[in-house]
Image (cartoon, helix red, strand yellow):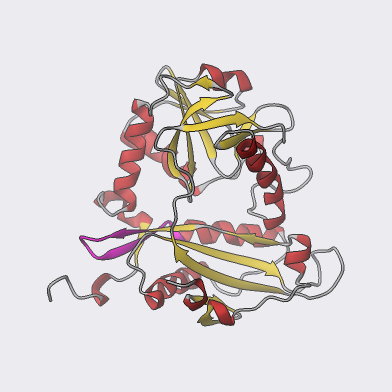
Amino acid sequence: MKLADTIVYTQGQFCSYADAHVGLLTHGLQYGTGCFEGIRGYWDAQERELYLVQLKEHFERLETSTKILMMRLPHSVAELSEIAVELCRRNNFEMDVYIRPFMFKSAEDIGVRLHDVPEQLAIVPVPFKPYLDASDGLRCCVSSWRRVDDACAPPRAKVTGLYVNSALAKSEAHLSGFDEAIMLSADGHVSEGSAENIFLVRHGVIYTPDPSQNILEGCTRRSVLHIAREEFNIPIVERAVDRGELYAAQEIFFTGTAVGIVHVGSVDHRRVGDGNVGPITRKIEQYYSRIVRGAEPRYRHWLTGVYGARRAPVGV
């Protein structure tokens, strides 16, 4: 599928990507005054169904982000969920997908502010491409760039302009021969990856930075915490994590909508465990993979089927 032919939603209507235009002086482009979400869809070829994961939760977080930026969504969370489903239907996706809803200040003028600036909603779905190749474990480094602090800008919102912080850390890591960066908070504690939440395992206990460490409160993070507690009875500690704990951890893994759940093989040239995916990481990742593809009936409420009864069963 060509991007130009993809059906998107913008300015209150469905149209082709090629017909959706943004002016060069658009406020959100010039000043980063926008926010976004990322939503994954998983294709089940046997059931011929596309499952969108936690639509409600993602749009609720988008609603929070827009509030922080003094914007208001033009649709309810339920309406936005139905628009996302309809986009997938209109594009006839039969593959894994990634959906990008975003709001941005749409005025075409000069002037740094949030007040008295009109805004616009758009939603763009695309076929999913793996975000990271983690088959051999990610090679990570601790970035020299600190995670943006809440006293400067709100890291709990997915604000477009704040991702310069992530981009600096990601490129620094890549250009230094690593796959991914681990960012520290302003006070030197572990915060998150460039676009992922982070978990450490030591002696059967999962440790992860708490929200005070300027993390994005991830939807996949919340799912993993639930699975670990409710399905496997794994102790979880949310607290400030020291940098040295990264080197002492027996397992480390990242979570995120785009990345899924992936294990870290090394940090700053120090091997994590034996470098391979650890037993707790593997157990959680495999169970999560079953959930998002509809194989765990008790978690069907996390999923929204795109086609359902509208599509005839195979062979009919």
Q: Residue furthest left?
A: 315
**Identity of the residue drawn at 49% across and 49% down:** 131
Residue 174 percent coordinates (x, y): 61, 39
Residue 221 percent coordinates (x, y): 48, 42
Q: Quadrant of the C terminus?
A: bottom left
Residue 46 percent coordinates (x, y): 20, 60
Q: What's the magenta region?
A: 42-55
From the viewer's side, name the closer residue of 117 and 164. Answer: 164
**Count of number-bearing discs:** 0
**Identity of the residue drawn at 67% across and 50% down:** 163
Asked if residue 24 lies in the magenta stretch, the reply is no
**Identity of the residue drawn at 63% across and 36% down:** 173
From the viewer's side, name the closer residue of 175 and 169. Answer: 175
Residue 280 percent coordinates (x, y): 36, 28
Q: Residue furthest right?
A: 111
Q: Quadrant of the N terminus?
A: bottom left
Q: In the image, 222: left or right of 92?
A: right
Asked if residue 46 lies in the magenta stretch, the reply is yes
Residue 54 image-quadrant placement: bottom left
Residue 288 image-quadrant placement: top left
**Identity of the residue drawn at 12% across and 73% down:** 315
Q: In the image, 48: left or right of 39?
A: left
Q: In the image, 173: left or right of 32?
A: left
Picture layout, residue 162 above or below residue 234 = below
